[in-house]
């Protein structure tokens, strides 16, 4: 979604919530330059937030934190900050502070501007609602929020001034610190302060790593990559949109680019930008912009497009699924539609589709459990396929490769009941091992490990297995 705030153009990529968490969520984070982390004041840091934080840490993505739902009862503010620092290993620096909570929520105090914004339920906050309080000892504070709330605020601010570290912009840019704001999003309270800080603090589009060099956004030559594919955004037209991050140069409508995975020239004539449910054609776009390209099955996640130079952007993650289900088709006559629907949704990256070597089943793998229900619902609504799923005893998937074809055939024969074809891993089908951790360790002769990674010798940033340059400092790693 693209919108303008205070003459700044913002491209907002909204990641799914915790219940519909998927692998697609990780990939969205690879296309951003900074992130806003929303924490539920009652729940604190949730498990999927920790996983997302790992992706941000790999990229040193700057993060601004918003503690939400202060109009409801929840954890004490200091406990929330401690929870974030302990679980996410990032230093919290409050730039606003809540006055009360739940039914006693009075507003927030802006520590930088030294002003109070009063909270009124079900009403939008306007700039004129803010009241400047130069000194917290001012009796006017007691009149505004009450004596008890005023004294609690004075105690909290005194504690913060003595214990909290000051905000350091360079530390924030390296993802070592996160400025923290408090509010209630459903009441649009505290959001203005968050957006003000976002446009003032967040960095502009930065350089991007490829397998050969770093691409700077100021370069004249055009480049970009696909990080998300969405099918049936308009069910009436059965369209598929590939979401494309521009990394350098200028996009103009109708320009010709090279699709390097296929080695073919492509005309970008119908690029689209989105604003909520509305979409419009775009005539030009710049580094940092996100555009949608109509996809007829030829574009895949991670594909790179440039006007001439052959590049491949790195760091688009692929994760082994953690949950598995077998698809049960209710009407065998709908097999063709089932195959089409599963493959198109696998191209989106929401689920992974496996076909066992022994048998005719389809097995789904996903990072989040709710994706199975989403897949069944979409099969029914978009492809007319009535299907259900049943649990499997698998907990791991690992991809099997070997330069020795004879050895691979022997391995496949020996372990055929635990092997399946990953139908959409890239350009070709790939062999995957499915089973319990102990089974895979016995079959592989060693631990079933995940994606390989290393550390940059210059700055210590995590670097993916296929990267030659560090995305944080640009140093050559391999």
Image (spheres, rainbow, N blue to C red):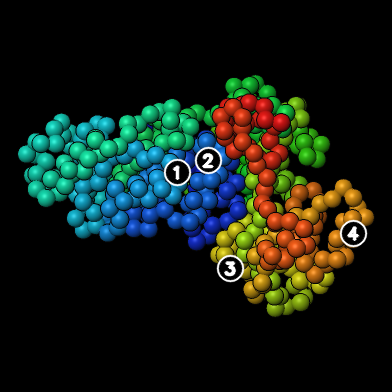
Residue that mark 1 sits on: 89
Residue that mark 3 sits on: 373
User: What is the distance, in whole Å, between disc 2 and disc 1 at their CAs?
Assistant: 10 Å
Instruction: Name the residue rendered at 90%, 50% in the picture.
Output: 404
Contact (Cβ within 8 Å) of mark 2 with mark 1: yes
Q: Is residue 469 left or right of residue 69?
A: right
Instruction: Name the residue rendered at 53%, 60% in the picture.
Output: 20
Residue that mark 4 sits on: 409
Instruction: Name the residue rendered at 74%, 68% in the picture.
Output: 362
User: What is the distance, in whole Å, between disc 4 and disc 3 at their CAs?
Assistant: 36 Å
Residue 138 seen in render: yes
Residue that mark 2 sits on: 57
Q: Earlier in the sequence, mark 4 or mark 1?
A: 1
Vertical placement of 23 versus 468: above or below? below
Say which element carries label 3: helix
Residue 39 horizontal/vertical position (percent):
39, 51
Q: Nearer the viewer, mark 2 or mark 1?
A: 1
Say which element carries label 2: helix
User: What is the distance, in whole Å, between disc 3 and disc 2 at their CAs?
Assistant: 30 Å
């Amino acid at each position: 979604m693209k919108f303008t705030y205070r003459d700044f153009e913002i491209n907002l990529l909204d990641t799914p919530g915790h219940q519909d968490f998927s692998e697609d969520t990780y990939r969205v984070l690879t296309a951003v330059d900074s992130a806003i982390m929303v924490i539920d004041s009652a729940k604190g840091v949730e498990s999927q937030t920790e996983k997302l934080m790992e992706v941000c840490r790999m990229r040193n993505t700057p993060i601004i934190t918003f503690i939400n739902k202060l109009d409801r009862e929840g954890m004490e503010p200091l406990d929330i900050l401690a929870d974030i620092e302990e679980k996410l290993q990032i230093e919290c620096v409050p730039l606003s502070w809540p006055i009360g909570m739940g039914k006693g929520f009075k507003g927030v105090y802006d520590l930088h501007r030294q002003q109070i914004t009063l909270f009124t339920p079900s009403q939008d906050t306007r700039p004129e609602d803010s009241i400047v309080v130069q000194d917290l000892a001012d009796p006017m504070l007691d009149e505004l929020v009450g004596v008890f709330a005023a004294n609690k605020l004075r105690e909290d601010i005194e504690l913060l001034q003595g214990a909290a570290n000051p905000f350091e912009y360079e530390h924030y840019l390296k993802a070592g610190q996160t400025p923290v704001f408090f509010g209630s999003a459903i009441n649009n309270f505290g959001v203005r302060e968050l957006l003000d800080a976002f446009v003032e603090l967040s960095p502009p589009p930065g350089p991007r790593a490829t397998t050969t060099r770093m691409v700077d956004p100021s370069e004249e030559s055009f480049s970009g990559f696909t990080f998300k594919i969405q099918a049936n955004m308009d069910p009436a037209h059965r369209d598929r949109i590939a979401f494309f991050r521009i990394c350098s140069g200028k996009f103009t409508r109708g320009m010709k680019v090279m699709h390097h995975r296929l080695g073919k020239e492509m005309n970008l004539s119908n690029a689209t930008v989105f604003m909520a449910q509305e979409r419009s054609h775009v005539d030009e776009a710049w580094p940092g912009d996100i555009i949608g390209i109509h996809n007829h099955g030829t574009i895949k996640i991670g594909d790179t497009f440039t006007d001439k130079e052959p590049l491949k952007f790195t760091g688009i993650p692929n994760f082994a699924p953690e949950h598995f289900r077998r698809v049960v088709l209710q009407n065998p006559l709908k097999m063709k539609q089932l195959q089409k629907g599963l493959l198109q949704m696998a191209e989106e990256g929401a689920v992974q589709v496996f076909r066992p070597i022994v048998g005719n089943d389809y097995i789904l793998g996903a990072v989040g459990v709710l994706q199975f229900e989403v897949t069944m619902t979409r099969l029914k609504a978009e492809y007319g396929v009535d299907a259900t799923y049943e649990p499997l005893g698998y907990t791991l998937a690992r991809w099997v490769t070997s330069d020795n074809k004879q050895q691979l055939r022997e391995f496949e024969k020996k372990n055929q009941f635990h092997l399946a074809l990953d139908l959409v891993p890239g350009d070709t089908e790939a062999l995957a091992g499915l089973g319990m951790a102990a089974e895979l360790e016995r079959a592989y002769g060693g631990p079933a490990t995940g994606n390989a990674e290393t550390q940059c010798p210059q700055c210590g940033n995590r670097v993916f297995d296929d990267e030659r340059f560090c995305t944080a400092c640009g140093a050559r790693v391999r």
